Amino acid sequence: MNLYLSALLFFLAILLPSGKGMFGNDGVKVRTCTSQKAICFFGCPPGYRWIAFCHNILSCCKNMTRFQPPQAKDPWLH
């Protein structure tokens, strides 16, 4: 059973830093970050620019309006 729990935690740890989840991730709204029109993630997803840290562990990321990479497109939208 420890192997199953370890595999589940490993799988979740892989998904969290990228900012992507099974149903999408809108990030966390923190006042210091939203004042700069940005949002906090565990790591900036593609198409977002890193600005600062939020609460020492999260990254304050702002959506790039110009020169977005092809990976920034949401694969679930048509």
Image (cartoon, rainbow, N blue to C red):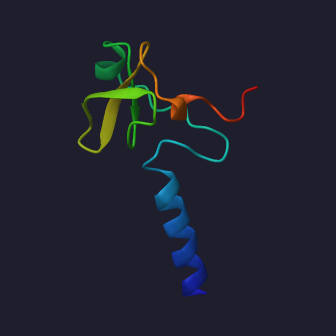
- Residue at image position (56%, 37%) is 25
- Give the total of numbered labels: 0
Image x and y of residue 8, in percent: 58, 70
Image x and y of residue 56, in percent: 23, 42
- The front one of 71 and 34 is 71
In the rendered image, the vertical position of residue 26 relative to residue 56, given as above or below = above
Residue 2 placement: quadrant: bottom right
Residue 42 placement: quadrant: top left
Q: Work out which quarter of the rendered image holds the C terminus and state it.
A: top right
- Residue at image position (72%, 34%) is 76
- Residue at image position (38%, 42%) is 43
34 on left or right of 55? right
Image x and y of residue 68, in percent: 46, 22
14 on left or right of 42? right
In the rendered image, the vertical position of residue 11 relative to residue 28, given as above or below = below
Image x and y of residue 23, in percent: 67, 41
48 on left or right of 55? right
In the rendered image, the vertical position of residue 52 relative to residue 18, given as above or below = above
Residue positioned most to the right: 78
Q: Work out which quarter of the rendered image holds the N terminus and state it.
A: bottom right
Residue 40 placement: quadrant: top left
- Residue at image position (31%, 13%) is 36
